[in-house]
Image: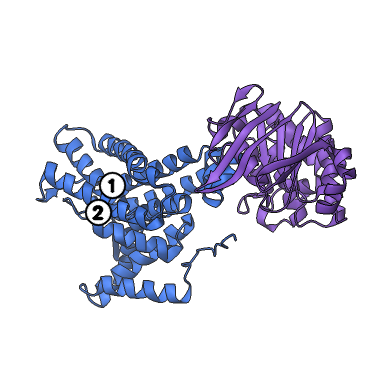
Chain colours: A blue, B purple
């Protein structure tokens, strides 16, 4: 029954990847850019939770909410200052800028908070549920539930609300959306805000599992989640969920049964194979370029 | 209602529209006809505020709109049905219509207009829950017009509504344009199909390589020898 435990842990890790992947996928869908600074927003989110709890002695939930709000604002500011001026520039310029923003955030964190590890507080109690011979920690269960809840709310938001419809319209045809009176810039801002707010939630869940906070904390989960987004089909919200969870399961099972050192290599090898067979990712749609 | 004065629009070094002026009075149907690449679409995009103008001014209800944001122009009652329909393929027919009313807050008015456009285009009602991308070309044109009507416009700019449609459908669409006009919506119609456009227009302007070269009533232009030669096939 060890396999089942690994599987559930994999789904839980994958849930964190999925939440982060949403940020990549939504921003890509609407602004057609890869926001490589997204992973570093996770890092900022983790520091904020850390300081709120240890420096200001705030309750855990309130600290997380403050972290969400600050990251949300950070996402809007990054988009406004770094990406908006490049709306008409080549995608390569935007990509390089995103990498620049990523390093900027990492270096600022190093400057203000040093590069030494800070121990993330224990935000979810250590207990676990036992089902027969399987035992699953509260954290694992909570992570999976939070991910499902986010997916549900986000799907409803995108499909049922007017802003959600506008987001889909902007992602499909910006000029047509403008002609309907949709404020494209504001819609892009909202998308960045949502993605960055979700990054803060992911930082809480990720650091609860791996409780160390340091300036490059966001790089690895960021890259993995980006991989998950591509794996599931970038631009697709269900794709982020499927891609994230698949990635989490593959990573956990490879660690358990093959090799801890090789697990990342296996993850990326599988990504390459999937993309060779289906270049748009598992749930990706082929976009017909208009001529 | 709409007055364009000495408008020039350039894409980089290329001037697509050169110093054109025209005006549209309340309740008129005015056609802008010309060949492919003459600058018709660029003119409409400049009016709608989605391409920046180089010089000149655009007055809508006596208010200069060439510097204001496109969504503000829509909320003032100027809407465009773009060339190639540009409906949202991954949204349902109903969602497309809701997006058309994006800036409106009057729920009752929106519901009423939804009924009105469904009565105007009964086929859209049958396809309410279908994705826009699954509609035929004619249905997409209807959806694009219905979507624009949902903004409750005073003036509607139509860019090549006949493009790619069968003659029968073109007639149907033009009848509906006349009907919309008779309900009080002013129409600016851009067309390559000069014969159809001149047939329903009160007045028309002929545009060639970015300049207006002729204007007159629809009938005058239909009977003009130059127009016959250039646009009506002899």
SS type, badge 2 = loop
Report the residue marked by disc 2: A218
Q: Which percent across, then down, holds residue B219?
A: 89, 39
Q: Which percent across, then down, holds residue B234?
A: 88, 55
Report the residue marked by disc 1: A41
Q: Is residue A122 left or right of residue A275?
A: left
Q: Kindly indicate whether the residues beneath marks 2 and 1 are on one polypeptide chain.
A: yes
Q: Is residue B21 left or right of residue B226?
A: left
Q: Which percent across, then down, holds residue B29?
A: 80, 35
Q: Is residue B52 above or below residue A280?
A: above
- Asked whether the beta carbons under mark 2 and mark 1 sit within 8 Å of each other, the answer is yes
In which quadrant of the rendered view does residue B9 lie? top right
Q: In terms of depth relative to the viewer, which is nearer, B228 or A6?
A: B228
Residue B199 appears anywhere in the view:
yes
Q: Chain of mark 1?
A: A
Residue drawn at point x = 74 percent, y = 56 percent = B137
The N terminus of chain B, quarter of image: top right
Q: Which percent across, then down, holds residue A16?
A: 33, 55
Residue A244 appears anywhere in the view:
no
CA gap between label 2 and label 1 equals: 7 Å
Q: Is residue B79 above or below residue A132?
A: above
Q: First in sequence: mark 2 or mark 1?
A: 1
Q: In terms of depth relative to the viewer, which is nearer, A203 or A2?
A: A203
Q: Is residue A232 left or right of residue B175?
A: left
Q: Is residue A109 left or right of residue A8?
A: left
């Amino acid at each position: 029954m060890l396999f089942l435990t690994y599987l559930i842990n994999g789904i839980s890790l994958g849930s964190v990847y999925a939440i982060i992947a949403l940020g990549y996928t939504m921003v890509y869908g609407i602004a057609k850019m890869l926001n490589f600074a997204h992973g570093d927003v996770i890092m900022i989110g983790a520091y904020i939770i850390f300081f709120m709890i240890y420096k200001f002695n705030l309750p855990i939930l309130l600290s997380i909410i403050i972290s969400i709000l600050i990251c949300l604002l950070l996402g809007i500011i990054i988009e406004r200052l770094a990406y908006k001026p490049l709306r008409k520039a080549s995608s390569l310029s935007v990509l390089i800028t995103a990498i620049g923003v990523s390093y900027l955030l990492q270096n600022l964190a190093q400057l203000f908070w040093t590069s030494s590890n800070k121990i993330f507080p224990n935000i979810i109690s250590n207990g676990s549920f036992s089902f027969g011979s399987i035992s699953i920690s509260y954290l694992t269960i909570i992570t999976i539930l939070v991910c499902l809840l986010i997916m549900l709310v986000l799907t409803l938001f995108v499909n049922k609300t007017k802003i959600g419809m506008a987001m889909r319209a902007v992602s499909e045809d910006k000029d047509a959306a403008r002609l309907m009176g949709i404020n494209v810039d504001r819609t892009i801002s909202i998308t960045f805000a949502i993605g960055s707010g979700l990054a803060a939630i992911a930082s809480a869940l990720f650091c609860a599992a791996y409780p160390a906070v340091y300036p490059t904390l966001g790089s690895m989960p960021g890259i993995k989640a980006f991989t998950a987004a591509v794996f599931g089909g970038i631009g697709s919200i269900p794709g982020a969920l499927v891609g994230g969870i698949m990635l989490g399961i593959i990573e956990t099972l490879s660690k358990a049964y093959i090799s801890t050192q090789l697990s990342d290599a296996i993850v990326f090898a599988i990504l390459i194979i999937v993309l060779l067979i289906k270049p748009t990712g598992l749930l990706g749609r082929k976009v017909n370029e208009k001529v | 209602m709409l007055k364009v004065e000495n408008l020039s629009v350039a894409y980089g070094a290329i001037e697509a529209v050169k110093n054109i002026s025209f005006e549209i009075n309340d309740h008129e149907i005015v056609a802008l006809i010309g060949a492919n690449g003459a600058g018709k679409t660029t003119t409409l995009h400049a009016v709608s505020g989605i391409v920046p103008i180089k010089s000149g001014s655009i007055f809508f209800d006596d208010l200069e709109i060439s510097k204001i944001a496109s969504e503000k122009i829509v909320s003032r009652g100027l809407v465009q049905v773009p060339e190639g329909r540009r409906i949202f393929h991954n949204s349902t027919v109903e969602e497309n219509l809701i997006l058309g009313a994006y800036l409106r807050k009057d729920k009752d008015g929106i519901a009423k207009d939804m009924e009105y456009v469904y009565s105007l285009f009964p086929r859209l009602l049958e396809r309410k829950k279908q994705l826009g991308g699954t509609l035929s070309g004619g249905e997409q044109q209807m959806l694009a017009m219905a979507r624009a009507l949902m903004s409750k416009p005073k003036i509607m700019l139509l860019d090549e509504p006949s493009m790619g449609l069968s003659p029968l459908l073109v007639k149907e669409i033009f009848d509906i344009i006349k009907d919309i006009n008779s309900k009080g919506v002013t129409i600016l119609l851009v067309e390559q199909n000069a014969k159809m456009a001149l047939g329903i227009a009160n007045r028309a302007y002929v545009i060639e390589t970015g300049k207006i070269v002729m204007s007159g009533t629809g009938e005058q232009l239909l009977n003009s020898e130059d127009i016959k030669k250039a646009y009506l096939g002899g």
